Image (tube, rainbow, N blue to C red):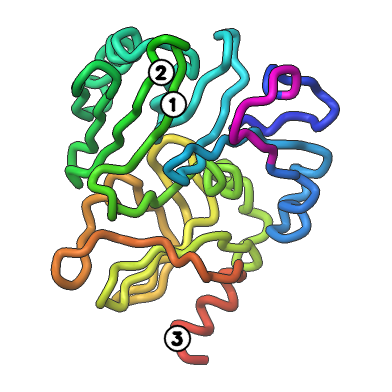
Amino acid sequence: MPWVEKTKPTQFDATPLHGSWFLVGDVVARRYQQDALRGKKFPLITYPSGLVKELCDTDDIGGEVNLFGVLNLKRQSSRDAAFQDAADLAEIYEYTVGRRGEDELLIFHPHSGNGYSVRYNNAASEIADIKRIPPHAMELVDGQCRALLPPLYTNEALGYNATAPIKLFAPGTGWTWYPTEYDGDNLFFGMVAGLEVELGYFSLTELEGVRGAFGLPLEQDLYFTPTTLQELQRLHRGL
């Protein structure tokens, strides 16, 4: 997770990018009981499509953009160079990568069939836009959500007093997922409310493949108010 001290300069401070911004750790700490984030910042970028992605300050000029899970793409790259980088990891992480036209990189999730179109400005050697495929498919964990979810085991001392910052649900069913921790790759810890209400681990791969009524994919509740696990447990059990 690329939280850095807010006084530490990054290449995104030195050369501000169109659409780039910082999530302020002091605000997150107050709202989500994550005291370790006080005095820190988290670089993000909003693309023309509206997708918000995590920026990683690496040794590469321009840094990297997290597409999903462990897959980072160099922000400054041509489409064909990016295709080669992505293809090298495709077999390991079981996603499908392809090219369309002269400037698009296509990457698909193995279980859901959903994916991303990454369009490059080849002349400038940089990512111009990132879109979901199909367009109506909601992104379950965008860059801001990655920032809000602390690493696994961070909230052990809090127990049921840990705050769930996001809510995912299967449309037309009673199933909901409330992640409170994330390994930054595929694994979450949090509360699952379905046949029972319980704490446990679940994966992004698993959630991408879940379908609700009429075959609809999972969605993120954009109007969810961050809530403690204790309060959520009472809510779902009708206490």
**Residue 137 percent across, percent down from the top left:** 29, 52
Label whose residue precedes the other's in the sequence (3 or 2): 2
Residue type for callout 3: Arg
Mark 3 is surrounded, within 10 Å at the Cα level, by few (under 14), some (14 to 19) or many (20 or more) other residues, namely few
Residue placed under numbered mark 2 in the picture: 121
Rendered position, 221 above or below 97: below
Asked which secondary structure carries label 3, the reply is: helix
Q: Which mark is residue 184?
A: none
Select label 1 or label 3 by which is in front: 1
Tell which tag, 3 or 2, sits nearer the viewer.
2
Residue interval drawn in magenta? 13-22
Residue closer to the observer: 76 or 85: 76
Which residue position holds label 3?
237
Q: Position of residue 67 (x, y in %)?
A: 41, 32
**Of the numbered discs in the image, which one, if any, rests on residue 128?**
1
Quadrant of residue 120 within the rendered picture: top left
Which one is nearer the viewer's eye here, 46 or 164?
Answer: 46
Q: Residue furthest left?
A: 214
Q: Are marks 2 and 1 in contact (CB under 8 Å)?
A: yes
The local secondary structure at tag 1 comes to strand
Spatial CA distance of label 1 from label 3 is 47 Å
Q: Position of residue 219 (x, y in %)?
A: 35, 62
Outermost bottom residue: 239
